[in-house]
Image: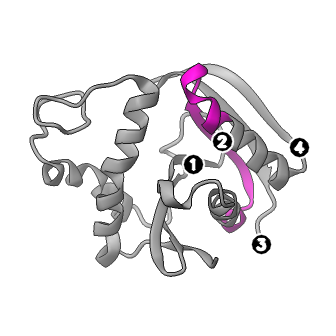
Amino acid sequence: MNVTVELCAPENKGIIYNLYPLYMHDLAEIRQELPNAFGVFEDTDEYRTLQSQQPLFDIWWQKEHVLFPFLIRVDGLPAGFGLVATPPYLVDDSEFMLNEFFILRPFRNQGVGERAAAAMFDRFAGQWMLFTTEGERNLHTQHFWRKALGKYTSGNFVETDEILPHYGSVKTFRFRSRGK
């Protein structure tokens, strides 16, 4: 299984646009959220189609060297994405934040997520932060990050429960990447 992580070129952003609703669907189960009146996972009825939601994400391709949209592939097929932010798009004083991370279900529990996350962390040496939904409904993801970061950092990460502006109660993970 060949796992690659590439900075997603603007001409390929449609792939991440295609994956994003699946990510939101997974989060809806964890966060117990419902779609809006038009079947789009947004908290407003302003978005009537998935296409109308897409301009929200264009910023990831407009802030070069600040925001980094990564496409994850397995044997050449799209398998997920990771969105990495740097200042001023952070919620704390870290240097890097994994803002969103998603692996399609057919590629889960095979080491794809761990390898992809490590490849992204290796791109940027420095202080990182990521967060996920806290609580019983998200134990699988919390376990994933403990395992992945435990391997990546040899156990040198800090896990805390926090309340973040715009995100609410979350479980955060902070660590230093080794870079390459």
Residue 168 position in % (x across, y down): 48, 20
Query: In the displayed structure, does residue 119 sit left or right of residue 155?
Result: left
In depth, the one of 110 and 45 nearer the eye is 110
Labels 4 and 2: the sequence-earlier one: 2
Mark 1 nearby-residue class (10 Å; few <14, some 14–19, many ≥20): some
Q: Which colour scheme is used?
A: one colour
Q: Check residue 155 in the rendering and tell me which mark sits there, or answer none.
A: 4
Q: In which quarter of the image is residue 112?
A: bottom right
Does residue 159 show up magenta in the picture?
Answer: no
- The residue identified by callout 1 is 98
Q: Magenta residues? A: 122-142
Frontmost of labels 3 and 4 is: 4
Label 4 with label 2: CB-CB less than 8 Å? no
Q: Check residue 129 in the rendering and tell me which mark sits there, or answer none.
A: 2
Query: In the displayed structure, does residue 111 sit left or right of residue 28?
Result: right
Q: What element carries label 4?
A: loop
Q: How far apart are marks 3 and 4 (CA)?
A: 19 Å
Q: What residue type is labelled 2?
A: Met
Q: Which residue is drawn at 35% across and 40% down?
A: 25
Number of numbered discs: 4
